[in-house]
Image (cartoon, rainbow, N blue to C red):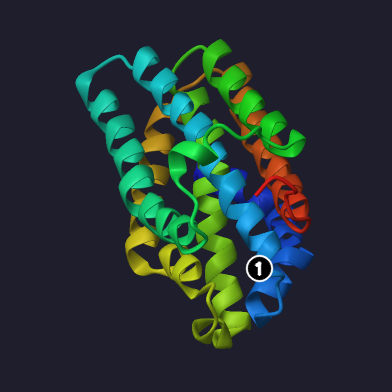
Amino acid sequence: MTFVEQCIHDCLPVWQECLDSEFLRRLADGTLDEACFKGYIVDDSLYIREYAKVFAWGMTKAQNMEDIRTYYSLLAFVNEGEGATRLRYLAQWGLEDNAVQRLPQRPENRAYTEYMIDAARTGEGAAECMMACLPCMLSYAWIFRKLLERAPGVRETGYWPLVRDYAGEEYAQKCRDWMDYAGQLCAGLSHERQARCREIFAACSRFETGFWEMSNHPRTDV
């Protein structure tokens, strides 16, 4: 088992909590209140803005052009791939991304992104940045594949475009690529830095549970 695979293995119980959250259970069976889903998409829009700053710290701490290109490709994939679906949902509700970006992050969202950015900023190198990014990426691939297996009828709901983005093979392959890259970054690290990377990965996985719990309550400002 690789270093990254061990981190995932250790956090699977937390990811299972996310999968079993009321928000995702209701999304899977089509009974989720649309107001909750709208709040989730708005919060995700604000999250992605801050998430991009973690990639920026990764570029800042990069030791070569390959690392810079990797972080740039991650940012492009998040912005162009995941972002397209998010923008379509916003447009469906008559919301513009520029207007959404002026809204505040909810406390659970803000605590999560502040932790990620601080972990990347204070880390010794690109490894800490990557380990802050990975739990969101990898947990979504795991969660939405499991959700689709559990509730194939989600294909018939308005939430299918979101599920499709994360349950598909293209996203799974990207996750494998990112895991390989993170493994390269973490190879040969000192015991202390590996421990810190595990700590960051576990903490960000735990923040994911808070994000899903938050999303089960609609925002009051959209």
Whole-percent x and y of residue 9? Answer: 63, 52
Q: In the picture provided, is 64 more to the left or to the right than 164?
A: left
107 to 156, vertically: above or below? above
Q: Which residue type does callout 1 highlight?
A: Glu
Whole-percent x and y of residue 107? Answer: 76, 34
142 to 123, vertically: above or below? below
Residue 220 visible = yes
- Quadrant housing residue 185: top left
Q: Secondary structure at mark 1?
A: helix
Whole-percent x and y of residue 170? Answer: 32, 62
Residue located 39% across and 69% down the image:
168
3 to 85, vertically: above or below? above
Q: How many marks?
A: 1
Residue located 51% across and 36% down the image:
133
Q: In the picture provided, is 27 more to the left or to the right than 64?
A: right
Q: In the picture provided, is 83 more to the left or to the right than 20?
A: left
Q: Looking at the image, which is closer to me, 168 or 42?
A: 42
Whole-percent x and y of residue 4? Answer: 52, 42
- Quadrant housing residue 17: bottom right
Q: Residues within 10 Å of mark 1 (few under 14, many from 20)?
A: some
Q: Looking at the image, which is closer to me, 96 or 171?
A: 96
According to the picture, the residue beneath numbered tag 1 turns out to be: 34
Q: Looking at the image, which is closer to me, 217 or 185?
A: 217
Residue located 37% across and 13% down the image:
60
